[in-house]
Image (cartoon, grey):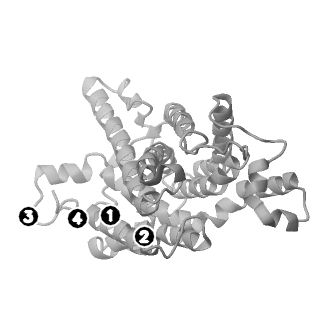
Amino acid sequence: MVRRNADVCLFLLVAFGASWLIALPVWLGAVRLATPAFALVGGLMMLTPSLGVLAVWALRRRGTPLKEWARATGLTLGPDRGRTAALLATALLGVPLLVAVALLISAAAGVVSLDFAGLSLFRAQLGAVLGQVPMDPRILYVVQAVQAVLIAPFLNAIPALGEEWGWRGWLLPRLLGDPAVTPPPAAGHENAEVAHAGNVNAEVAHAGTSDAEVVGAGGVNAGGAGTGGGNIGAAGERRGRRVWLALALSGVIWGLWHAPLTLKGYNYPALGAWAAVLFVGFCVVFGALLGWMRLRSRSVWPAVIAHGSLNAVTGLALLLGDADAPPNPALAGVTGAVGWALLAVVVFVAFRLRPVVSAPR
C-alpha cells in the first residue's frame, strides 16, 4: 500500500513540510497576521505544492519527458482550446459574480449589514490613508473593484499556479488513478490490486476527451443507458463515485495544507485555531468547482484564474459591510456558511449541465 502510493506520500511530504518551514516565522512570533511580511509568507507557501509535483517528477517519474509531464499535469490548454477559453472567461467573470451573489444572499439572510452609501468599513480600513487619497472613496472602491476583477487574477496567477499545479494539476488525476501521472507497478509486483489502482479509472481522470460516457451530478454514466445494460451502468456509477471521492479528498488535503496559517485564525480571526477546521469545509466545496474546471478542460489554467480571482475579490467584497457591525466571515460571504451553500448548488448544476466526460485518452 505504501509502496503503491509512494509518489503521493512524497508529494504531501514536500508540500506540507515546505509550507510549515516557510510559516515558521509566524509561529515564532516574528511575523504577525495582516502585515506585509505575512502576505509574503502566504505567497511563498503557495509555491510549495508545485515543489511537490517537481519532486515526484524528478524522483518517481525520471523517465517521463518534461513536455509529457507538463501535458499530463494540465500545463497545456488541453485538447479543446475553445472549451478551455470558455472556462477561462467563466473563471474570470464567474468567480466575482459568485462572490457578489454570496454577499447579497448573506445580506438578505440577515448575517451581514451592508453600507453601500457610506462605505464605512472601507473607509475604516483605509484609516489615515483616506485623507491622503485625492479621490472620493466611492470612486476609489469602484476602481479597486475593477482592478480586482479584470487585472488582479492575472497578477495572482503565478502564486495561484503554485497551488493549482499541485492540487488540481497533479493530485486530483493521481487520486483518480490516471496512468499518465501514476508510477507504473514495480517489477515483480504486478498483481491485480496494483494494476487496478493504476488503471481502473484512467478514463475518468482524462475527462473531456470523448462523448462516449459522461459522469454528471450523482455519478451517473449517461452513456450506459443506451449501450447495454446493468454492467455498464454500474461501472459508470462506480466511476462517478470515484470522481466525487477524489474531489472531496483533494479538497480536504488542500484545506489541511493551509493549517500553518489557519491555526492562527487566518480567514476567520474570531475563531482562532478553529478557523483551520472551517476552512477545510470551504476548500472541499470550492475545490470541487476548481476540480470540475480541471477535468472538463484537461487544463489547470481555468482553476488558476478562478483561484487568483477569488483571492482578489473576496476581501474587497466584505469591505462593503457596516463598520458598526463588521461581517462575520464564518457566516457571510463566499467563504462563510452562505457561500458554502451557494457553491454546493453551483457545483451540482455544473456537473449536471456540463458533465465530466469519461473515456480513455
> Spatial distance from mark 1 to mark 4, Cα to Cα?
10 Å
At 57% across and 69% down in the image, what residue appears? 39
User: Total marks drawn?
Assistant: 4
> Spatial distance from mark 3 to mark 2, Cα to Cα?
46 Å
Q: Amino acid at mark 4?
A: Ala
Which mark is drawn over residue 12? 1
Callout 2: helix, strand or loop? helix
Label 2 or label 1, whichever lies nearer to me, is: 2
Q: Tell me residue 141's x, y (percent).
A: 80, 54
Precedes in sequence: disc 1 or disc 4: 4
Which mark is drawn over residue 27? 2
Q: Amino acid at mark 3?
A: Gly
At 85% across and 55% down in the image, what residue appears? 137
Which residue was labeled with disc 4? 6
Instruction: Kindly tell me whether residue 145 is visible in this rendering.
Output: no
Q: Amino acid at mark 1?
A: Leu
Q: Tell me residue 90's x, y (percent).
A: 64, 46
Question: For residue 4, what is the image quadrant?
Answer: bottom left
Callout 1: helix, strand or loop? helix
Precedes in sequence: disc 3 or disc 1: 1
Callout 3: helix, strand or loop? loop
Which residue was labeled with disc 3? 188
> Spatial distance from mark 2 to mark 1, Cα to Cα?
21 Å
Position of residue 219 in the picture relative to residue 38 (left or right): left
Q: Tell me residue 117's x, y (percent).
A: 84, 42
Circle 4 packing at 10 Å, graded few (<14), some (14-19), many (20+), is some
Q: Tell me residue 159's x, y (percent).
A: 55, 67
At 15% across and 56% down in the image, what residue appears? 1
* Relative height, residue 261 to residue 340 (above, below): below
> Spatial distance from mark 3 to mark 1, Cα to Cα?
26 Å
